[in-house]
Image (cartoon, rainbow, N blue to C red):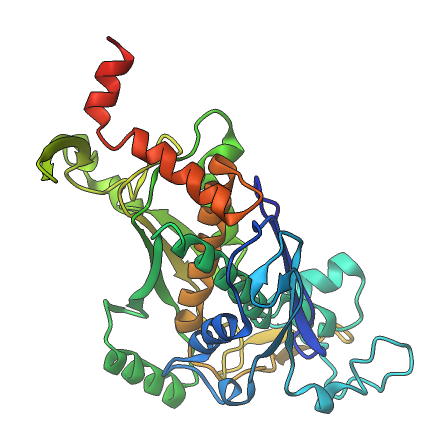
């Protein structure tokens, strides 16, 4: 994705040698290392509804460029996440023309996957190439990039957290609830979806704009999150609940907060509620940024779904490719990563800086001048 100041992209296939993630625009001077990224990838693998695959996805990583002795240089950062299962697939997935025949002929497109449309769009003979690139395995690369963005945000005391707010039909589930639903899936050959929520605390005001469609913070967030394979809906703040709220309740009223600090008083403007989820008019308003994403059930349903053999036109059943009961738990980490990338891009768009010290200085000076908003306003208009 190309942001205002940051550009990031991923490459690689599900069963290829590895996934490659690159990000350009991170200022020089940020401390980053393989441990930070590996920890984020480990969190993505966790979850009681995950299947056997998480046990062998080791996610061994290597930072190839853009970091020198644990500090960013300002140059593009590239990361590779090696596939621990590569030896099993090397002969077939070879990039040269001497590869072996596909061990699994995928002529029966799976409902809910990109299989059929990729076959028709790209003139593929099988669903193999759609399966490889469209796979949610690609999201590991996004999480690696998100770890870089999160590390940058921490320099501004901006904290990004996530949680599961719905798992199948259970609202605000505990780990025990998730385990029960996962067991039900296993017993019934099913998969389930849910909702995940990312919150950005200590969110500064003034990020984003209303001056154009692509400068609105919520449009950037929605586009990034909707690009995640399993996501089918995005909400900011109250989201779809707005449909059933009267205006007098829906909109966040504003109050003046007086505070005493170091024998001096200061004033700030605060929203009484946060239905807007931290964004008004395309601009962050200083309240927590709250983003919720709806995740669909994994399409590879053990209870095989009806499809067609594209060679014969005869009815058949889709072949399930994985054993997870749900993608909701890892999706929480992927949405977290995408939100971190968008907010980091908005920070750098507003404050610039070739080095981290320059960005931090610009950030602190801007908000220092506006710490006492009422005083600032009065002086400006006196």
Which residue occupies 57% across, 42% down?
Answer: 5
Q: Position of residue 12 (x, y in %)?
A: 69, 69
Q: Position of residue 274 (x, y in %)?
A: 22, 43
Of the pair 271 and 331, the residue shown nearer to us: 271
- Residue 89 in sight: yes
Which residue occupies 68% across, 60% down?
Answer: 117
Q: Is residue 16 left or right of residue 374?
A: right
Which residue occupies 51% across, 45% down?
Answer: 345
What quarter of the picture does the C terminus occupy? top left
Of the pair 118 and 142, the residue shown nearer to us: 142
**Hey, which quadrant is residue 176 in on the image?**
bottom left
Of the pair 182 and 209, the residue shown nearer to us: 209
Q: Is residue 274 left or right of residue 70?
A: left
Which residue occupies 20% across, 23% down?
Answer: 374
Q: Position of residue 170 (x, y in %)?
A: 25, 70
Above-or-below relation of 325 to 237: below
Of the pair 65 and 235, the residue shown nearer to us: 65
Q: Is residue 8 left or right of residue 335?
A: right
Most extreme residue toward the top is 382
């Amino acid at each position: 994705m190309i942001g205002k100041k940051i550009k990031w992209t991923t490459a690689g296939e599900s069963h290829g040698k590895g996934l490659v993630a690159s990000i350009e625009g991170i200022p020089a001077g940020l401390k980053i290392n393989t441990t930070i990224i590996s920890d984020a990838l480990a969190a993505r693998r966790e979850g009681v509804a995950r299947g056997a695959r998480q046990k062998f996805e080791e996610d061994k990583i290597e930072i190839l460029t853009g970091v020198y002795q644990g500090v960013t240089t300002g140059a593009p950062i590239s990361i590779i996440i090696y596939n621990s299962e590569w030896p099993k697939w090397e002969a077939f997935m070879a990039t040269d023309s001497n590869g072996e025949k596909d061990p699994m002929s995928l002529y029966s497109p799976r409902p809910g996957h990109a299989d059929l449309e990729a076959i028709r769009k790209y003139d593929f003979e099988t669903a193999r190439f759609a399966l490889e690139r469209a796979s949610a395995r690609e999201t590991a690369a996004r999480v690696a990039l998100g770890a870089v963005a999160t590390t940058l945000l921490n320099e501004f005391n901006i904290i990004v957290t996530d949680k599961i707010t719905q798992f199948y039909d259970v609202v605000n589930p505990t780990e025990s609830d998730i385990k029960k639903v996962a067991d039900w899936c296993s017993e019934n050959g099913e998969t389930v979806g849910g909702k995940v929520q990312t919150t950005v605390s200590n969110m500064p005001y003034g990020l984003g704009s209303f001056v154009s469609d692509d400068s609105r913070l919520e449009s950037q967030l929605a586009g990034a999150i909707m690009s995640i394979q399993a996501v089918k809906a995005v909400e900011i703040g109250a989201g779809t609940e707005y449909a059933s709220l009267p205006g007098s309740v829906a909109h966040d009223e504003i109050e003046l907060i007086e505070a005493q600090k170091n024998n001096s008083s200061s004033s700030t403007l605060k929203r009484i509620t946060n239905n807007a989820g931290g964004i008004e008019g395309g601009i962050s308003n200083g309240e927590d940024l709250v983003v919720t994403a709806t995740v669909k059930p994994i399409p590879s349903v053990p209870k095989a779904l009806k499809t067609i053999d594209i060679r014969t036109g005869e009815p058949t059943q889709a072949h399930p490719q994985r054993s997870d009961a749900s993608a909701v738990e890892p999706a929480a980490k992927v949405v977290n990563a995408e939100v971190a990338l968008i907010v980091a891009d908005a920070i750098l768009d507003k404050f610039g800086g070739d080095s981290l010290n320059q960005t931090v200085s610009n950030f602190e000076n801007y908000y220092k001048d506006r710490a006492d908003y009422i005083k600032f306003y009065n002086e400006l208009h006196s």
